[in-house]
Image (spheres, helix red, strand yellow):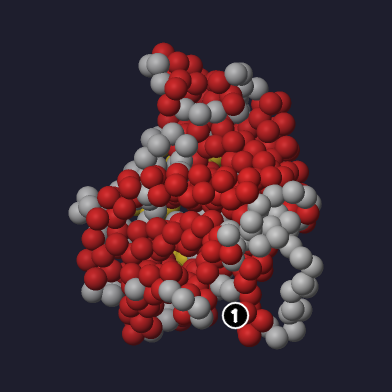
Amino acid sequence: MEWFAAGDYTIAREILQRGVAAVFVLAFVAVLRQFPALLGSGGLLPVPRYLARLERVTRRSRVLTLFWWRYSDALLRTVGWVGLLLALSLVVGLPQAGPWWVPLVAFLLLYVLYLSIVEVGQTFYAFGWETLLLEAGFIVAFLGSDDVAPPVLVLLAARWLVFRVEFGAGLIKMRGDPAWRDLTALYYHHETQPMPGPLSWHAHHAPRWWHRVEVAGNHVTQLGIVWLLFAPQPVASIAAGVIVLTQAWLVVTGNFAWLNALTMVLAASAISDSSWRWLLPFLPEPADDGVASGANIGFGVVVAAFFVLTVVLSYWPVRNLLSQRQLMNASFNRFRLGNTYGAFGSITRRRREVVVAGTLAAEPTEDDWREYGFRGKPGEVRRRPPQVAPYHLRLDWLMWFLALGGRDEAWFVAFLRRLLEADPATLRLLRHDPFDGVAPRFVRARVYRYRYTTRAERRVSGDTWVRVSAGVLVPPVALGDLPPTP
Protein backbone atom coordinates (compact mmCIF):
# COMPACT_ATOMS: atom_id res chain seq x y z
CA MET A 1 0.00 0.00 0.00
CA GLU A 2 2.83 2.44 -0.80
CA TRP A 3 0.34 4.36 -2.98
CA PHE A 4 -1.65 5.03 0.17
CA ALA A 5 1.11 6.66 2.20
CA ALA A 6 2.49 10.20 1.83
CA GLY A 7 5.76 9.96 3.69
CA ASP A 8 6.87 13.41 2.53
CA TYR A 9 4.00 15.14 4.33
CA THR A 10 4.69 14.59 8.03
CA ILE A 11 5.15 18.33 8.59
CA ALA A 12 1.90 18.98 6.74
CA ARG A 13 0.10 16.58 9.07
CA GLU A 14 1.54 18.31 12.13
CA ILE A 15 0.39 21.71 10.87
CA LEU A 16 -3.05 20.42 9.91
CA GLN A 17 -3.79 18.62 13.14
CA ARG A 18 -2.33 21.16 15.54
CA GLY A 19 -3.51 24.16 13.52
CA VAL A 20 -7.13 23.00 13.24
CA ALA A 21 -7.07 22.09 16.94
CA ALA A 22 -5.80 25.60 17.76
CA VAL A 23 -8.77 27.09 15.93
CA PHE A 24 -11.07 24.83 17.92
CA VAL A 25 -9.42 26.26 21.05
CA LEU A 26 -10.45 29.76 19.95
CA ALA A 27 -13.93 28.57 19.06
CA PHE A 28 -14.54 26.99 22.45
CA VAL A 29 -13.06 29.98 24.28
CA ALA A 30 -15.65 32.09 22.43
CA VAL A 31 -18.35 29.62 23.49
CA LEU A 32 -17.42 29.98 27.14
CA ARG A 33 -17.11 33.77 27.01
CA GLN A 34 -20.00 34.71 24.74
CA PHE A 35 -22.57 31.93 24.34
CA PRO A 36 -24.38 32.25 27.72
CA ALA A 37 -25.04 35.97 27.23
CA LEU A 38 -26.04 35.62 23.58
CA LEU A 39 -27.87 32.29 23.54
CA GLY A 40 -28.09 30.94 27.07
CA SER A 41 -31.25 30.58 29.13
CA GLY A 42 -31.28 34.32 29.78
CA GLY A 43 -29.61 35.30 26.53
CA LEU A 44 -30.71 37.42 23.60
CA LEU A 45 -31.95 34.40 21.63
CA PRO A 46 -32.37 31.68 24.27
CA VAL A 47 -31.66 28.15 23.09
CA PRO A 48 -34.54 26.59 25.11
CA ARG A 49 -37.04 28.83 23.32
CA TYR A 50 -35.45 28.00 19.94
CA LEU A 51 -35.59 24.25 20.56
CA ALA A 52 -39.20 24.49 21.75
CA ARG A 53 -40.09 26.31 18.54
CA LEU A 54 -38.39 23.61 16.45
CA GLU A 55 -40.23 20.95 18.43
CA ARG A 56 -43.55 22.55 17.55
CA VAL A 57 -42.80 22.42 13.82
CA THR A 58 -41.42 18.84 14.05
CA ARG A 59 -37.90 19.74 12.92
CA ARG A 60 -36.16 17.75 15.64
CA SER A 61 -34.59 15.34 13.13
CA ARG A 62 -33.08 18.18 11.09
CA VAL A 63 -31.05 19.68 13.94
CA LEU A 64 -28.23 17.48 15.21
CA THR A 65 -27.38 18.65 18.70
CA LEU A 66 -26.74 17.10 22.07
CA PHE A 67 -29.02 19.75 23.56
CA TRP A 68 -32.14 17.92 22.43
CA TRP A 69 -31.50 15.82 25.53
CA ARG A 70 -31.72 18.96 27.62
CA TYR A 71 -30.28 22.45 27.68
CA SER A 72 -28.83 24.29 30.64
CA ASP A 73 -26.12 26.88 30.89
CA ALA A 74 -24.18 24.50 33.12
CA LEU A 75 -24.30 21.78 30.46
CA LEU A 76 -23.26 24.31 27.82
CA ARG A 77 -20.24 25.29 29.88
CA THR A 78 -19.38 21.62 30.38
CA VAL A 79 -19.44 21.11 26.60
CA GLY A 80 -17.29 24.21 26.21
CA TRP A 81 -14.69 23.10 28.73
CA VAL A 82 -14.52 19.53 27.41
CA GLY A 83 -14.04 20.87 23.88
CA LEU A 84 -11.41 23.37 25.00
CA LEU A 85 -9.34 20.83 26.96
CA LEU A 86 -9.59 18.22 24.20
CA ALA A 87 -8.49 20.77 21.59
CA LEU A 88 -5.56 21.83 23.77
CA SER A 89 -4.45 18.20 24.06
CA LEU A 90 -4.37 17.99 20.26
CA VAL A 91 -2.43 21.25 19.99
CA VAL A 92 0.35 19.80 22.18
CA GLY A 93 0.16 16.45 20.35
CA LEU A 94 -0.95 14.04 23.09
CA PRO A 95 -3.51 12.00 21.08
CA GLN A 96 -1.16 11.94 18.08
CA ALA A 97 1.38 10.01 20.16
CA GLY A 98 -0.98 7.03 20.46
CA PRO A 99 -2.46 4.58 17.94
CA TRP A 100 -4.00 5.94 14.72
CA TRP A 101 -7.54 5.80 16.08
CA VAL A 102 -6.88 8.06 19.09
CA PRO A 103 -6.67 11.38 17.18
CA LEU A 104 -9.56 10.12 15.05
CA VAL A 105 -11.78 9.80 18.12
CA ALA A 106 -10.52 13.10 19.57
CA PHE A 107 -11.28 15.14 16.44
CA LEU A 108 -14.63 13.46 15.86
CA LEU A 109 -15.61 14.29 19.43
CA LEU A 110 -14.64 17.93 18.81
CA TYR A 111 -16.74 17.85 15.66
CA VAL A 112 -19.79 16.49 17.52
CA LEU A 113 -19.46 18.99 20.37
CA TYR A 114 -19.06 21.99 18.10
CA LEU A 115 -21.79 20.84 15.71
CA SER A 116 -24.13 20.70 18.71
CA ILE A 117 -23.32 24.35 19.43
CA VAL A 118 -23.53 25.59 15.84
CA GLU A 119 -26.89 23.88 15.34
CA VAL A 120 -28.49 25.94 18.12
CA GLY A 121 -26.43 29.11 17.53
CA GLN A 122 -29.02 30.68 15.24
CA THR A 123 -27.98 33.99 13.68
CA PHE A 124 -24.96 34.32 15.98
CA TYR A 125 -23.44 31.20 14.39
CA ALA A 126 -24.60 31.76 10.81
CA PHE A 127 -21.11 32.30 9.43
CA GLY A 128 -19.23 30.35 6.80
CA TRP A 129 -16.21 29.80 9.01
CA GLU A 130 -18.32 27.78 11.45
CA THR A 131 -19.01 25.11 8.82
CA LEU A 132 -15.43 25.43 7.55
CA LEU A 133 -14.13 24.54 11.01
CA LEU A 134 -16.52 21.61 11.31
CA GLU A 135 -15.52 20.23 7.93
CA ALA A 136 -11.82 20.80 8.55
CA GLY A 137 -12.04 19.03 11.92
CA PHE A 138 -13.79 16.08 10.31
CA ILE A 139 -11.15 15.78 7.58
CA VAL A 140 -8.04 16.00 9.75
CA ALA A 141 -9.51 13.37 12.06
CA PHE A 142 -8.48 10.80 9.45
CA LEU A 143 -4.82 11.83 9.21
CA GLY A 144 -3.83 9.21 11.76
CA SER A 145 -1.15 9.39 14.44
CA ASP A 146 2.62 9.23 14.45
CA ASP A 147 2.33 5.44 14.14
CA VAL A 148 1.29 5.67 10.48
CA ALA A 149 2.32 7.75 7.50
CA PRO A 150 -0.07 10.53 6.45
CA PRO A 151 -2.63 9.11 4.02
CA VAL A 152 -2.65 10.64 0.53
CA LEU A 153 -6.44 10.52 0.26
CA VAL A 154 -6.97 12.66 3.36
CA LEU A 155 -4.42 15.22 2.17
CA LEU A 156 -6.29 15.39 -1.14
CA ALA A 157 -9.56 15.94 0.75
CA ALA A 158 -7.96 18.85 2.65
CA ARG A 159 -6.79 20.39 -0.64
CA TRP A 160 -10.28 19.93 -2.07
CA LEU A 161 -11.63 21.89 0.88
CA VAL A 162 -9.15 24.72 0.24
CA PHE A 163 -10.14 24.65 -3.42
CA ARG A 164 -13.82 25.06 -2.57
CA VAL A 165 -13.06 27.94 -0.21
CA GLU A 166 -10.92 29.81 -2.74
CA PHE A 167 -12.60 28.94 -6.03
CA GLY A 168 -16.08 29.41 -4.56
CA ALA A 169 -15.10 32.86 -3.31
CA GLY A 170 -13.60 33.73 -6.68
CA LEU A 171 -16.69 32.68 -8.61
CA ILE A 172 -19.13 34.45 -6.29
CA LYS A 173 -17.18 37.67 -6.84
CA MET A 174 -17.08 37.39 -10.62
CA ARG A 175 -20.77 36.50 -10.77
CA GLY A 176 -21.77 39.20 -8.31
CA ASP A 177 -20.75 42.81 -7.95
CA PRO A 178 -19.37 44.46 -11.13
CA ALA A 179 -16.78 46.17 -8.90
CA TRP A 180 -14.90 42.86 -8.84
CA ARG A 181 -14.92 42.66 -12.62
CA ASP A 182 -13.76 46.23 -13.21
CA LEU A 183 -11.15 45.88 -10.42
CA THR A 184 -12.55 48.71 -8.28
CA ALA A 185 -13.87 46.64 -5.34
CA LEU A 186 -11.05 47.62 -3.01
CA TYR A 187 -11.72 51.29 -3.54
CA TYR A 188 -14.43 50.62 -0.91
CA HIS A 189 -13.80 47.31 0.84
CA HIS A 190 -11.10 48.30 3.34
CA GLU A 191 -13.41 51.05 4.63
CA THR A 192 -16.73 49.19 4.55
CA GLN A 193 -15.73 45.65 5.58
CA PRO A 194 -17.48 44.32 8.70
CA MET A 195 -14.55 44.59 11.12
CA PRO A 196 -11.63 46.76 10.00
CA GLY A 197 -8.25 46.13 11.59
CA PRO A 198 -5.49 48.44 12.81
CA LEU A 199 -3.92 48.67 9.33
CA SER A 200 -7.16 48.95 7.36
CA TRP A 201 -7.01 52.76 7.31
CA HIS A 202 -3.57 52.59 5.70
CA ALA A 203 -4.70 49.92 3.23
CA HIS A 204 -7.65 52.09 2.20
CA HIS A 205 -5.37 55.04 1.47
CA ALA A 206 -3.03 53.05 -0.78
CA PRO A 207 -2.94 54.26 -4.40
CA ARG A 208 -5.84 53.21 -6.55
CA TRP A 209 -3.53 51.41 -8.97
CA TRP A 210 -2.49 49.21 -6.03
CA HIS A 211 -6.14 48.43 -5.21
CA ARG A 212 -6.60 47.26 -8.79
CA VAL A 213 -3.50 45.09 -8.49
CA GLU A 214 -4.94 43.62 -5.27
CA VAL A 215 -8.19 42.67 -6.97
CA ALA A 216 -6.41 41.24 -10.00
CA GLY A 217 -4.13 39.22 -7.73
CA ASN A 218 -7.16 37.93 -5.87
CA HIS A 219 -8.74 36.71 -9.11
CA VAL A 220 -5.53 35.06 -10.30
CA THR A 221 -5.13 33.23 -6.99
CA GLN A 222 -8.73 32.18 -6.42
CA LEU A 223 -9.62 31.27 -9.98
CA GLY A 224 -6.27 30.11 -11.34
CA ILE A 225 -3.50 29.25 -8.92
CA VAL A 226 -5.84 27.26 -6.67
CA TRP A 227 -6.04 24.55 -9.38
CA LEU A 228 -2.30 23.96 -8.96
CA LEU A 229 -2.84 22.54 -5.47
CA PHE A 230 -3.39 19.23 -7.26
CA ALA A 231 -0.26 19.53 -9.45
CA PRO A 232 2.96 17.56 -8.84
CA GLN A 233 5.60 18.94 -6.50
CA PRO A 234 7.05 21.50 -6.18
CA VAL A 235 4.26 23.26 -8.09
CA ALA A 236 1.65 22.34 -5.48
CA SER A 237 3.83 23.72 -2.69
CA ILE A 238 4.34 26.97 -4.58
CA ALA A 239 0.60 27.30 -5.16
CA ALA A 240 -0.07 26.71 -1.46
CA GLY A 241 2.53 29.34 -0.60
CA VAL A 242 0.77 31.91 -2.79
CA ILE A 243 -2.53 31.11 -1.09
CA VAL A 244 -0.93 31.50 2.34
CA LEU A 245 0.50 34.89 1.37
CA THR A 246 -2.82 36.19 0.02
CA GLN A 247 -4.64 35.00 3.12
CA ALA A 248 -2.00 36.63 5.32
CA TRP A 249 -2.67 39.92 3.54
CA LEU A 250 -6.34 39.57 4.46
CA VAL A 251 -5.32 38.98 8.10
CA VAL A 252 -3.24 42.16 8.05
CA THR A 253 -5.97 44.33 6.51
CA GLY A 254 -9.11 43.06 8.26
CA ASN A 255 -10.76 40.88 10.89
CA PHE A 256 -12.53 37.81 9.50
CA ALA A 257 -12.49 35.60 12.60
CA TRP A 258 -10.56 32.41 11.86
CA LEU A 259 -11.46 32.17 8.16
CA ASN A 260 -8.05 33.26 6.89
CA ALA A 261 -5.99 31.49 9.56
CA LEU A 262 -7.82 28.21 8.99
CA THR A 263 -7.45 28.49 5.22
CA MET A 264 -3.70 28.96 5.64
CA VAL A 265 -3.53 25.89 7.88
CA LEU A 266 -5.45 23.81 5.34
CA ALA A 267 -3.21 25.02 2.51
CA ALA A 268 -0.31 23.29 4.27
CA SER A 269 -1.80 20.01 3.00
CA ALA A 270 -0.13 20.77 -0.34
CA ILE A 271 3.33 21.65 1.01
CA SER A 272 5.75 18.73 1.07
CA ASP A 273 8.42 18.15 3.69
CA SER A 274 11.04 18.61 0.96
CA SER A 275 9.68 22.08 0.21
CA TRP A 276 9.69 23.00 3.88
CA ARG A 277 13.33 21.90 4.20
CA TRP A 278 14.27 23.89 1.10
CA LEU A 279 12.63 26.96 2.61
CA LEU A 280 13.90 26.29 6.16
CA PRO A 281 17.20 24.36 5.83
CA PHE A 282 17.60 24.13 9.61
CA LEU A 283 14.69 21.70 9.90
CA PRO A 284 15.98 18.23 10.89
CA GLU A 285 15.78 15.33 8.50
CA PRO A 286 13.11 12.75 9.41
CA ALA A 287 14.35 9.88 11.55
CA ASP A 288 14.24 6.44 9.92
CA ASP A 289 12.47 4.82 12.85
CA GLY A 290 10.51 2.22 10.97
CA VAL A 291 7.15 4.03 11.13
CA ALA A 292 4.53 2.18 9.16
CA SER A 293 4.15 3.29 5.57
CA GLY A 294 0.39 3.31 5.77
CA ALA A 295 -0.08 -0.45 5.43
CA ASN A 296 -2.19 -0.72 8.57
CA ILE A 297 -5.23 -2.57 7.22
CA GLY A 298 -7.77 -1.15 9.66
CA PHE A 299 -6.55 2.39 9.11
CA GLY A 300 -6.61 1.88 5.34
CA VAL A 301 -10.22 0.69 5.38
CA VAL A 302 -11.34 3.66 7.50
CA VAL A 303 -9.53 6.16 5.24
CA ALA A 304 -10.96 4.55 2.09
CA ALA A 305 -14.49 4.79 3.51
CA PHE A 306 -13.85 8.43 4.41
CA PHE A 307 -12.68 9.20 0.88
CA VAL A 308 -15.70 7.53 -0.70
CA LEU A 309 -17.92 9.66 1.55
CA THR A 310 -16.00 12.78 0.47
CA VAL A 311 -16.52 11.95 -3.20
CA VAL A 312 -20.24 11.36 -2.71
CA LEU A 313 -20.73 14.57 -0.74
CA SER A 314 -18.82 16.56 -3.37
CA TYR A 315 -21.66 16.26 -5.87
CA TRP A 316 -23.67 19.10 -4.28
CA PRO A 317 -20.87 21.70 -3.95
CA VAL A 318 -19.67 20.94 -7.49
CA ARG A 319 -23.18 21.43 -8.83
CA ASN A 320 -23.38 24.68 -6.90
CA LEU A 321 -20.07 25.92 -8.30
CA LEU A 322 -21.33 25.27 -11.82
CA SER A 323 -24.66 26.99 -11.19
CA GLN A 324 -25.32 30.56 -12.29
CA ARG A 325 -27.31 30.88 -9.05
CA GLN A 326 -24.37 29.94 -6.86
CA LEU A 327 -25.11 29.80 -3.16
CA MET A 328 -22.65 31.35 -0.72
CA ASN A 329 -21.69 29.57 2.52
CA ALA A 330 -24.33 26.87 2.26
CA SER A 331 -24.63 23.36 3.68
CA PHE A 332 -26.39 20.57 1.79
CA ASN A 333 -26.82 18.07 4.62
CA ARG A 334 -27.48 17.93 8.35
CA PHE A 335 -23.86 17.05 9.12
CA ARG A 336 -22.41 20.31 7.69
CA LEU A 337 -19.98 18.36 5.46
CA GLY A 338 -19.31 18.94 1.78
CA ASN A 339 -20.23 22.61 2.07
CA THR A 340 -19.91 25.50 -0.34
CA TYR A 341 -18.07 28.68 0.58
CA GLY A 342 -17.60 32.25 -0.60
CA ALA A 343 -17.87 35.82 0.64
CA PHE A 344 -18.38 39.41 -0.51
CA GLY A 345 -20.27 38.69 -3.68
CA SER A 346 -21.36 42.31 -3.33
CA ILE A 347 -19.39 45.25 -1.99
CA THR A 348 -20.87 47.91 0.29
CA ARG A 349 -20.01 51.39 -0.98
CA ARG A 350 -20.86 53.30 2.19
CA ARG A 351 -20.30 52.37 5.79
CA ARG A 352 -23.22 52.62 8.21
CA GLU A 353 -22.85 52.03 11.93
CA VAL A 354 -25.45 51.64 14.65
CA VAL A 355 -24.45 53.65 17.72
CA VAL A 356 -26.19 52.69 20.97
CA ALA A 357 -26.38 55.20 23.83
CA GLY A 358 -28.09 55.51 27.18
CA THR A 359 -28.91 58.16 29.74
CA LEU A 360 -29.67 58.40 33.44
CA ALA A 361 -31.66 61.60 33.02
CA ALA A 362 -35.44 61.56 33.37
CA GLU A 363 -35.78 64.28 30.69
CA PRO A 364 -32.54 63.97 28.75
CA THR A 365 -30.98 66.63 26.57
CA GLU A 366 -28.48 65.72 23.86
CA ASP A 367 -25.58 66.25 26.28
CA ASP A 368 -26.98 63.63 28.67
CA TRP A 369 -26.51 60.67 26.30
CA ARG A 370 -23.51 58.35 26.77
CA GLU A 371 -22.44 55.84 24.15
CA TYR A 372 -21.74 52.16 24.80
CA GLY A 373 -18.39 50.98 23.46
CA PHE A 374 -18.09 47.72 21.54
CA ARG A 375 -14.93 45.63 21.58
CA GLY A 376 -14.31 45.45 17.87
CA LYS A 377 -16.72 47.43 15.74
CA PRO A 378 -16.13 51.13 14.98
CA GLY A 379 -17.67 53.57 17.43
CA GLU A 380 -15.54 56.38 18.82
CA VAL A 381 -14.13 58.32 15.88
CA ARG A 382 -10.69 58.59 17.43
CA ARG A 383 -10.28 54.90 18.22
CA ARG A 384 -8.20 52.86 15.80
CA PRO A 385 -9.85 49.49 15.01
CA PRO A 386 -8.23 46.69 17.04
CA GLN A 387 -6.81 43.40 15.81
CA VAL A 388 -9.40 40.82 16.82
CA ALA A 389 -9.02 37.91 14.38
CA PRO A 390 -8.66 34.99 14.61
CA TYR A 391 -10.98 35.45 17.58
CA HIS A 392 -14.64 36.05 16.72
CA LEU A 393 -16.74 38.82 18.29
CA ARG A 394 -20.23 37.65 17.43
CA LEU A 395 -22.22 40.61 18.78
CA ASP A 396 -20.02 43.10 16.91
CA TRP A 397 -20.48 41.23 13.62
CA LEU A 398 -24.25 41.20 14.03
CA MET A 399 -24.18 44.95 14.62
CA TRP A 400 -22.64 45.36 11.14
CA PHE A 401 -25.44 43.33 9.59
CA LEU A 402 -27.98 45.30 11.60
CA ALA A 403 -26.73 48.55 10.08
CA LEU A 404 -27.26 47.04 6.62
CA GLY A 405 -30.75 45.89 7.55
CA GLY A 406 -29.92 42.36 6.56
CA ARG A 407 -30.56 40.27 9.68
CA ASP A 408 -33.39 39.50 12.09
CA GLU A 409 -33.72 42.31 14.64
CA ALA A 410 -35.33 40.28 17.46
CA TRP A 411 -31.96 39.85 19.14
CA PHE A 412 -31.38 43.62 19.08
CA VAL A 413 -34.61 44.38 20.92
CA ALA A 414 -33.52 41.85 23.55
CA PHE A 415 -30.09 43.51 23.64
CA LEU A 416 -31.62 46.91 24.39
CA ARG A 417 -33.71 45.32 27.13
CA ARG A 418 -30.57 43.82 28.72
CA LEU A 419 -28.88 47.23 28.65
CA LEU A 420 -31.86 48.79 30.40
CA GLU A 421 -31.63 46.02 33.00
CA ALA A 422 -27.84 46.51 33.28
CA ASP A 423 -27.48 42.78 32.79
CA PRO A 424 -23.88 41.90 33.85
CA ALA A 425 -23.44 39.09 31.29
CA THR A 426 -24.47 41.36 28.43
CA LEU A 427 -22.32 44.24 29.65
CA ARG A 428 -19.29 41.93 29.71
CA LEU A 429 -19.65 41.55 25.95
CA LEU A 430 -18.93 45.26 25.61
CA ARG A 431 -15.67 47.17 25.89
CA HIS A 432 -17.18 50.09 27.76
CA ASP A 433 -20.30 50.58 29.90
CA PRO A 434 -20.65 54.35 30.44
CA PHE A 435 -22.76 53.79 33.57
CA ASP A 436 -20.49 51.34 35.42
CA GLY A 437 -23.23 48.79 36.00
CA VAL A 438 -26.03 51.24 36.83
CA ALA A 439 -29.21 50.73 34.80
CA PRO A 440 -29.96 53.68 32.50
CA ARG A 441 -33.43 55.23 32.29
CA PHE A 442 -33.47 55.25 28.49
CA VAL A 443 -31.49 53.81 25.61
CA ARG A 444 -31.55 54.69 21.93
CA ALA A 445 -29.94 53.53 18.68
CA ARG A 446 -28.94 55.89 15.89
CA VAL A 447 -27.43 55.17 12.49
CA TYR A 448 -24.36 57.08 11.34
CA ARG A 449 -22.52 57.25 8.06
CA TYR A 450 -18.83 56.54 8.74
CA ARG A 451 -15.85 57.17 6.51
CA TYR A 452 -12.13 57.14 7.08
CA THR A 453 -10.44 60.45 7.68
CA THR A 454 -8.15 61.67 4.93
CA ARG A 455 -4.44 61.89 5.64
CA ALA A 456 -4.79 65.65 6.13
CA GLU A 457 -7.76 65.29 8.49
CA ARG A 458 -5.93 62.70 10.55
CA ARG A 459 -2.85 64.86 10.90
CA VAL A 460 -4.99 67.65 12.33
CA SER A 461 -7.45 65.72 14.51
CA GLY A 462 -5.83 62.35 15.15
CA ASP A 463 -9.18 60.72 14.34
CA THR A 464 -9.61 57.53 12.37
CA TRP A 465 -13.23 58.17 11.36
CA VAL A 466 -15.55 60.98 10.34
CA ARG A 467 -19.22 60.35 10.99
CA VAL A 468 -22.49 62.11 10.22
CA SER A 469 -25.98 61.24 11.39
CA ALA A 470 -28.01 59.09 8.98
CA GLY A 471 -31.19 58.64 10.97
CA VAL A 472 -32.79 57.00 13.98
CA LEU A 473 -33.07 53.23 14.28
CA VAL A 474 -34.67 53.12 17.74
CA PRO A 475 -35.87 56.33 19.44
CA PRO A 476 -35.33 56.74 23.18
CA VAL A 477 -37.07 53.87 24.99
CA ALA A 478 -37.47 52.90 28.61
CA LEU A 479 -37.74 49.37 29.95
CA GLY A 480 -41.51 49.54 30.02
CA ASP A 481 -41.64 50.58 26.35
CA LEU A 482 -40.16 47.33 25.08
CA PRO A 483 -42.28 44.28 24.39
CA PRO A 484 -42.06 41.59 27.09
CA THR A 485 -39.70 38.70 26.57
CA PRO A 486 -41.71 35.90 24.88
Q: How many marks?
A: 1
Residue at 68% across, 33% down: 79
Residue at (45%, 20%) from the top-left corner? 60
Res. 351 visible in picture? no
Q: Secondary structure at mark 1?
A: helix
Percent from the top left, x then y, of residue 160?
44, 59
Q: Does residue 384 appear left or right of residue 10 in this picture?
A: left
Near-viewer residue (48 or 147):
147
How dense is the environment of label 1, judged by Cα within 10 Å: few (below 14), some, or many (20 and up)? some
Residue 159, compared with residue 369, is above or below; it is below
Quarter of the picture holding the N terminus: bottom right
Closest to the observer, 319 or 10: 10
Residue at far left of view: 324
Q: Is residue 180 above or below residue 302?
A: below
The location of residue 193, given as percent across then percent down, is 42, 61
The residue where tag 1 is placed is 275
Residue 315 in sight: yes
**Residue 352: x percent and y percent?**
38, 54
Q: Is residue 292 left or right of residue 394?
A: right
Q: Identify the residue at horizontal 61%, vertical 22% (top origin).
A: 71
State the residue lying farthest toward the top.
56
Q: Where in the figure is residue 343, as x and y percent of width and height?
A: 38, 57
In the image, 452 versus 187, the foreground residue is: 187
Q: Residue at x 44, y 47 (%)?
A: 308
